[in-house]
Image: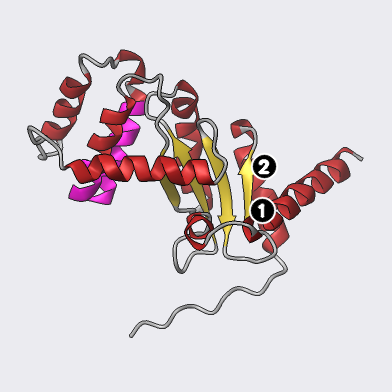
Amino acid sequence: MKTKVMTLAAVVVMMFASAWAADMSAAETSALQPPKGRRIALVAFEDLECQACAKAEPLLMQAERNYGLPLVRHDFVIPVHVWSEEAHIMARWFDAQSPELGEEFRHYIFTNQNAIYKTNLREWAEKFGRTQGHPLPVTFDPALRSKVEADKQLGIALGVHGTPTIFVVTNSPKVQFVQVMDTEKLFETIDKVNEELKNEPQPAPTKKK
C-alpha cells in the first residue's frame, strides 16, 4: 500500500509539472529541459553561501556519477547572504576559462563554506585560481554580474523561492520535469522518473555531419 501511495504521489507531481509547463514561456520551458542529446538531467538553482546547498552538493555529484546525468546549475543569490553574489560572479569567471574549472570552483566554495566570510572570499578565490593556473583579474566584466542576475530572474519566473531548488528534467512530453521536494530523496525521485520513462521509445541519436 505504501508503494502505491508513493507512486500515485509521484504521478500527481508529474501531472502538475506538465500543466505548469504549458503556461511557461519558451525561455522558461527551455531552462527545464536536458541539454541537447540527453534524455534526462538535473537542474539546480543554488546559492554558494547557502548551507543547505552545500549539504546537497555531494548528493548532486553522486547523482551525476551514479546515473551519468548532466547537472545544469543556475545562480539564485539570496539577498541576506553577504558574499554570495561575488562568489557567483567569480564562478562565472572561472566558467569562462573552462566549464570544468567553474564546476571545481563551486565545489571548492561549498566544501570550504564554513571558513569563508565577506572579508576573506577574495583570498580563498585567489588561492584556488593560483593552484589552477588562472589568477583572478583585478576586476570582473560587468556582464558576469548581469548573467548572475538573469539566472535569478529566471528562477523567480519559474517559481523558485529558496535554495537549493532541484528539478529532474526530461525530454519527454509525458514527464517534463519533477521538482525534488526533499534532497534526501534525490535518488528516489530520479528512479521514479526513470521508471516512468522506461517504456517510452528512446529518441534516435543525432547524426554527426
Q: Residue at x 30, y 45 (%)?
A: 147
Residue sitting nearer the eye, 141 or 57:
141
**Which range of residues does the magenta coloring cover?**
93-110
Vertical placement of residue 141 versus 37, above or below: above
Q: Residue at x 24, y 43 (%)?
A: 144
> Three-letter amino acid code at disc 2?
Glu
Q: Quadrant of the N terminus?
A: top right
What is the CA distance from the residue labelled 1 to the residue labelled 2?
22 Å
For mark 2, what is the residue? 188
First reached walking from the N terminus: tag 1 or tag 2: 1
Q: Which residue is drawn at 54% across and 38% down?
A: 160
Vertical placement of residue 22 versus 136, above or below: below
Q: Along the horizontal axis of the image, is 181 left or right of 142?
A: right
Q: In which quarter of the image is the C terminus?
A: bottom left
Q: Which colour scheme is used?
A: secondary structure
Asked if one can make out residue 209 in the rendered structure from this viewpoint, the answer is yes
> Which mark is in front, 1 or 2?
1
Give the crowd class for mark 2: few <14, some 14-19, many >=20 residues within 10 Å.
few
Q: Where is residue 133 in the image (x, y as percent from the top left)?
A: 10, 39
Vertical placement of residue 117 versus 130, above or below: above
Query: Which mark identifies residue 77?
Result: none
> Three-letter amino acid code at disc 1?
Trp
For mark 1, what is the residue? 20
Q: Main secondary structure of the magenta part?
A: helix
Asked if one can make out residue 74 in the rendered structure from this viewpoint, the answer is no
